[in-house]
Amino acid sequence: MTRIIDGRGTGKTSELMSLAKDNNATFVCSNPYAMKYKADKYGVKGISFISYDEFSTVLNNKEKYVIDELENFMKAVFGSNFIGYTIS
């Protein structure tokens, strides 16, 4: 699993888009329309985008996914019940 961790404005989303494209993965994000627009501006083509809500209904173990802003995804899925995590 690839973890892309860095500050704001450092190219994390662009790198995640490249990872999705290279692995034929679906890009999960809060606003697929805005992210598609951003991908077009970056010149990245051929990525499928779905929202956090859509992801919860189409999860398929045979497909690959990348998730933009994992903390926001967890908050969207679990709401205020999501209170912390670790990463290693």
Image (cartoon, rainbow, N blue to C red):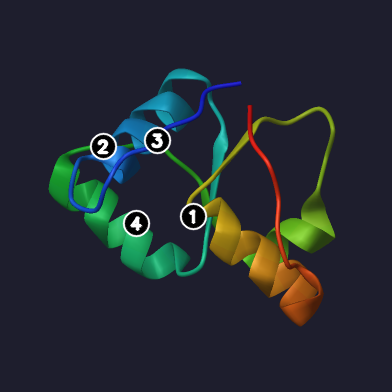
Of residues 57 and 16, the one drawn nearer to the viewer in this rendering: 16
Give the labeled residue for mark 4.
Answer: 36
Q: What number is the disc on residue 69? A: 1
* Image mark count: 4
* Label 2 vs 1, first from the N-terminus: 2
Q: What residue type is labelled 1?
A: Glu
62 vs 40, left or right, is right
Give the labeled residue for mark 3.
Answer: 16
Q: What residue type is labelled 2?
A: Val
Q: In this view, does 82 lie above or below 50?
A: below
Q: Residue at x 73, y 31 (%)?
A: 63
Q: Residue at x 26, y 37 (%)?
A: 44
Of residues 40 and 9, the one drawn nearer to the viewer in this rendering: 9
78 vs 16, left or right, is right
Q: Cα distance, mark 3 to mark 2? A: 11 Å
Q: Cα distance, mark 2 to mark 1? A: 19 Å
